[in-house]
Amino acid sequence: MRAAPGAQLAIQDIFGRDPFIAALWRVLDGNSVRLEAERRIGKTSILHKMQAEPLAGWEPVWLDLEKVHSAAEFAEQVSVDSGAAAAGRGRGCQAEAPSRE
Ligand SMILES: Nc1ncnc2c1ncn2[C@@H]1O[C@H](COP(=O)(O)OP(=O)(O)OP(=O)(O)O)[C@@H](O)[C@H]1O
Ligand SMILES: [Mg+2]
């Protein structure tokens, strides 16, 4: 594996995290999750891996919340961006809040 600071890793290069991801899916079955941790610890990589390899019955949707500033805007973004998933074809939604720099 080559080091590529700042680059999005290929899914097969996202190492480990499987027990944590399994725990996240269990929690998401009934709750929301907020991932908060130090910079560069691997939060976004975990979301990418969950999106690429969802649990059966889930349809992850990636939303960039950088331009969203209210609950109403968030609901609108979910509706627009998730399309068929929001209409009930799958379940679930992933969103990544902007990082605080
Ligand atoms: N599970 C992993 N396997 C291999 N490399 C990883 C893993 N998680 C993180 N990395 C490495 O660390 C870098 C930062 O990961 P990532 O962007 O997921 O972190 P982050 O917590 O979202 O960071 P930020 O707080 O800056 O948004 C990646 O580009 C990769 O090089
Ligand atoms: Mg990140």
Image (cartoon, helix red, strand yellow):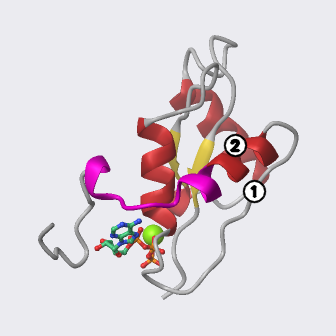
Q: Position of residue 57 (x, y in %)?
A: 64, 19
What is the chief secondary structure element of the magenta stretch? Answer: helix
On screen, 36 above or below 34? below
Is the CB–ligand 1 distance for label 1 below 8 Å? Answer: no
Q: Where is residue 3 in the image (x, y as percent from the top left)?
A: 16, 76
On screen, 69 above or below 6? above
Q: How crowded is mark 2: few (under 14 residues within 10 Å), some or many (20 or more)?
A: some
- What residue is rendered at 66% in x and 36% in y? 76
- Left or right relative to 1: residue 30: right
- What residue is rendered at 72% in x and 63% in y? 34
Q: Mark 2 points at which residue?
A: 25
On screen, 94 above or below 57? below
- What residue is rendered at 59% in x and 30% in y? 55
- In the rendered structure, which amino acid carries the disc numbered 1? Val
Q: Mark 1 points at which residue?
A: 33
- What residue is rendered at 51% in x and 44% in y? 50
- Earlier residue among tags 1 and 2: 2
The stretch in magenta equals: 11-21
Q: Quadrant of ligand 1?
A: bottom left
Closest to the observer: 38 or 11? Answer: 11
- In the rendered structure, which amino acid carries the disc numbered 2? Trp
SS assignment at label 1:
loop
Residue 9 appears in which quarter of the rendering? Answer: bottom left
- Left or right relative to 12: residue 51: right
Residue 14's tag is none
